[in-house]
Amino acid sequence: MNQSENRQFRLARRPAGMVKREDFEFRTDRPRPPESGEIMVGVEYLSLDPAMRGWMNEGKSYIPPVRLGEVMRALGLGTVIESKAPGFAPGDTVSGQLGVQSVATVAAKDCFKVDPSLAPKPLFLSALGMTGMTAYFGLLAVGEPKPGETVVVSGAAGAVGALVGQIARIKGCRAVGIAGGAAKCRYLVDELGFDTAIDYKSEAVPAKLREHCPKGIDVYFDNVGGQILDDCLAQINLRARVVICGAISQYNNTTPVKGPANYLSLLVNRARMQGMIVFDYADRYAEAARDIAGWMREGKLRSREDIADGIETFPETLLKLFTGENFGKLILKV
Amino acid sequence: MNQSENRQFRLARRPAGMVKREDFEFRTDRPRPPESGEIMVGVEYLSLDPAMRGWMNEGKSYIPPVRLGEVMRALGLGTVIESKAPGFAPGDTVSGQLGVQSVATVAAKDCFKVDPSLAPKPLFLSALGMTGMTAYFGLLAVGEPKPGETVVVSGAAGAVGALVGQIARIKGCRAVGIAGGAAKCRYLVDELGFDTAIDYKSEAVPAKLREHCPKGIDVYFDNVGGQILDDCLAQINLRARVVICGAISQYNNTTPVKGPANYLSLLVNRARMQGMIVFDYADRYAEAARDIAGWMREGKLRSREDIADGIETFPETLLKLFTGENFGKLILKV
C-alpha cells in the first residue's frame, strides 16, 4: 500500500437517476496526518451498499447527505498506519466509515477494532458487519418471526436478503426468496437452504407467492419496494409484519417513488409496515455477531462475498448493485 | 312503527366508483318471524359509515362482502318486538348489525342490549358505539400517544376523527385536525378543543403541517389516504406511528388506489404504519365505553350526531360521507 498518496472518490454532483462515473471526482491527495483523537488507516476493503445511493441525494434522511466535494461515504476495513488516539496502535485492524479512499484519517471514536484472526477480513463488512446486523435485527427485532411462520424476502440473493432467509430457517420459519434469475434462485435453494425461491424476472410473482406461501405471508422483508412490495402486501396474513429495509427498485428513479397501492391490506389484515435502520441496534451488535459467528461455525449460515478489485473501479462496481449483477455481498478491494 | 312490513335496501349490483341509488333495490317484504335463538327488532337508527363502501365490493376483506341480493349491512339500534332467544324480551333496546331495513330478524348472539336511560339512543351508534371504540382503540392501542406528543388526524370533523382529536387532548397531546372547509375547522377548534385545524380545501397542507406541528408528527391517524397521507408521512418524527383506520378518498376510485409515495419516510424514521379493525378489541369495549362516558360527563368530550330522516333516503344520505357534506356522526333515523 502506498501511504504517501490518498486515492479517493469525491461526490462531484448529485446524481439524476442511475449513478454515473461523472457523479464523482477521482483524485489523488496527500494523506492528512492524524490530529489528537484521530487515526490514519490504510483502507483495504470497502463495503458497497444500496444505502449509498440515498446518501448521495440532497435532503433530510436518517443521516446527513454526503456534501458535494466530500469524499464519498462508505463503510470500510483497514489497518491503522498512525494513531493519535488511545487504544489504537499501528497494525490494528479497524472498521468504520472510512470513505471511498485508500488512506482515511478519521476520528477513532467512529471506528472499532476487529480481530482478523477470527475470520477473513471481508467478513467483517459482510455477515459480521453492518450487513449481518441489518439482517439480524431487521428480521428478528422488527419482523418478529415465530416458528412455523412464512417469511418472504426480496433481494434475496443480495447481501442482507441471503442472511435474512437463512436466519428465518434457523428460527424455524419457511423461507421464500425473491431474486432475479435462475442462477440466483438455485443458489438460494441449493446452497443457502431456502425452502424455495421465485425468479421475478421470468415468473409471475403473485401466482408463485400463492403457490409457495400456501398459508400466506407472515413476515415480508422488503429490500426492493415497487411492484414486488405490492405483490407481497396482497398476500399477507392477519397481523403480518412488513419490514421496510430498502427499496432498491426506487433509488435511481427520476420519477416519483411508486407508493404501495396495496397498503390497505395493512388495514384489512391489521398488519404493520415498519422501517428499520441498523444503527439503532448498535448496543446489541455484539450479541448479533456472536449468534451469527456461531451459526457460521455450525454450518447453518453461509456468507458469500463478491469482491471487486481496485478502488478506481468504484463507480462501475457500485452500479452492479442496481443492475442486479452482483451476487452476495459486494465488496471493493482497495 | 309499522311492524307488518319490512322496508329494506338490498344490494342490487356492485358499485363502480361513487355509490348510486341504482346500486340498491328498495323493497318492502313481510318481516320474517324469529326462529330459535333469533330476535325480531324494530330498527330505529342506522349507523352510516365509510366502511360500508368496502363491504359492497367483491373480494377478500376483513369480513365477507355483502352478497348481491342481500340486505345491505349496517350497524343499527332498535327495540325488540319478538324474541326467541333467552335474555332478550320485547321492549329491550339492542344494537348490532341489523342491516338497512325497518324490521330485522337476526341472531340474538350478534346483538347486545343497551340501557337507553344512560344516554340518547343515537349515542350508542356514535361515541358509545363502534365509532367511539374505533377512535379509542385506534388512537390508544395502535397509535400509543404519549403526553406532549403531536397527534394529527384527518377526516377530523367526521365521527371517528372528532373523537380521536379530543381523546388525544385528554391524553395530554397536541391535537391537529385536517378537515374540509372553514366551518368544520372552526368547529374542531372552538367546540371540540383541538389545538388547531387545517382546511385541506383552501390551505396548503404541507406548509400548514410545518406551521402547526413545529416538533413534527408523532401519531398520524389516517381516515382518508391519498395525498393527505403522503403529506403527513413527509413530516413524521422518529418512531412515529401511522394508524390506518380508513381511506375514504380512495373508496370510490375507479382507478387503482394511490399508494403512499412517501412510505420510505417509515424507513428513514424507523416509523410504523399499522392497520386497525375495531372488532379485534371486542373484549375491551366495556372499558372504552366507561372511559368515554366518563369523559362526556366531565365535559371533556363531545359527540355530534348528524341525523338524517327516513330509511328511503339511505343511498343519498350515505353519499354525504363521500362528498364531505356530513358533520359529525352520520345516522339515519328509520
Image (tube, coloured by chain):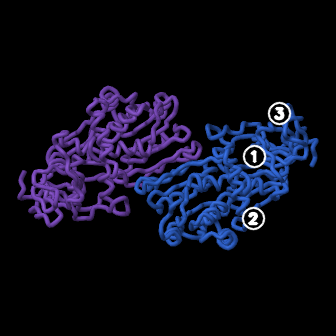
Chain colours: A purple, B blue
Quadrant assignment, res B154: bottom right
Which residue is labeled 1 in the image?
B74
**Residue A220 appears in the rendering:** yes
Q: Is residue B63 above or below residue A192?
A: below
| Amino acid on which the number 2 mark rests in the picture | Arg
Q: CA distance from mark 3 to mark 1?
A: 20 Å
> Which is nearer the eye, A140 or B134?
A140
Q: Position of residue A109 (x, y in %)?
A: 23, 59
> Which is nearer the eye, B85 or A50?
B85
Which residue is labeled 3 in the image?
B37
> Which is nearer the eye, A117 or A245?
A117
Q: CA distance from mark 2 to mark 3?
A: 36 Å
Q: Residue furthest front?
A: A87
Q: Is residue A65 left or right of residue A103?
A: right
Q: CA distance from mark 2 to mark 1?
A: 28 Å
- SS under mark 3: loop
| Amino acid on which the number 3 mark rests in the picture | Gly
Q: Is residue B179 above or below residue A323?
A: below
Q: Do tag 2 and tag 3 residues touch (Cβ < 8 Å)?
A: no
Q: Are marks 2 and 3 on the same chain?
A: yes
- SS under mark 1: loop
10 Å neighbourhood of mark 3: few (<14), some, or many (≥20)?
Answer: some
Q: Are marks 3 and 1 on the same chain?
A: yes
Which residue is labeled 2 in the image?
B297
Q: Chain of mark 1?
A: B
| Amino acid on which the number 1 mark rests in the picture | Ala
Q: Do tag 3 and tag 1 residues touch (Cβ < 8 Å)?
A: no
Between circles 2 and 1, the one closer to the viewer is 2
Q: Is residue B328 left or right of residue B145?
A: right
Q: Residue furthest top?
A: A190
Between circles 3 and 1, the one closer to the viewer is 3
Q: Chain of mark 2?
A: B
